[in-house]
Amino acid sequence: VYRNLRRGAENRGYFELAGTFFHREMVMNRNKSPLFSFARFLSKLEDLVTGYGERPSRVLRFAALLIVSYALAYSLVGIHGDGHEVILDSARTLAENLGDFGRCLYYSIVTFTTLGYGDFIPVKPLARFFAATEALVGAFSMSLFIVVFVRKRMR
């Protein structure tokens, strides 16, 4: 049903409406998959992250969630910068811990965008692993946003 509605909307030049029907078509296809199948999981992930290529704002939300998650990980594992280790510590005040979280958030943004200024350094192996994976996921996410954005605007 949604496929026919999408095709009809495309033929009449209603591309925004066609995008909505395409999204519903893909949701219906996902619902036909076995409940705990890998294909259904991947389809749901694609819907959450990109809205099946129809929602660039979801990619931006995904990127923001990743940046904040990695910042939290860095603040728990620790990075070096500003002449000391930047890490959450229960012996420090809330203001100091919030300042360090802000530094970790800054480091996460710089790593996600692969700028890498070098003012903060992941010293521990786990922090290095986080930095490497964030850089890879960040580059992929920015590319994904461009693809979804251009796909949406080309119509």
Image (spheres, rainbow, N blue to C red):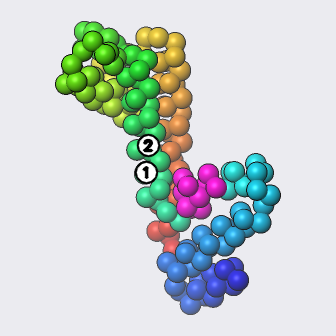
The residue carrying pointer 2 sits among few (fewer than 14), some (14 to 19) or many (20 or more) residues within 10 Å by Cα, namely: few
Q: Residue at x 32, y 11 (%)?
A: 85
Q: CA distance from mark 1 to mark 2?
A: 6 Å
The three-letter code of the residue at mark 2 reads: Leu
Q: Position of residue 84 (x, y in %)?
A: 27, 9
Residues in magenta, as a range: 44-53
Q: Position of residue 5 (x, y in %)?
A: 64, 85
Q: Residue at x 58, y 86 (%)?
A: 9
Mark 1 in CB contact with mark 2 (< 8 angstroms):
yes
Q: Nearer the viewer, residue 69 or 109?
A: 69
Does residue 83 appear in this view?
yes
Q: Nearer the viewer, residue 22 or 98?
A: 98
The residue carrying pointer 1 sits among few (fewer than 14), some (14 to 19) or many (20 or more) residues within 10 Å by Cα, namely: some
The residue identified by callout 1 is 61
The three-letter code of the residue at mark 1 reads: Arg
Q: Is residue 86 above or below residue 18?
A: above
Q: Position of residue 47 (x, y in %)?
A: 59, 58
Q: State left or right for residue 79 relative to residue 32.
A: left
Does residue 120 appear in this view?
no
Q: Residue at x 55, y 75 (%)?
A: 20
Q: Secondary structure at mark 2?
A: helix
Name the image quarter holding the N terminus.
Answer: bottom right
The residue identified by callout 2 is 65
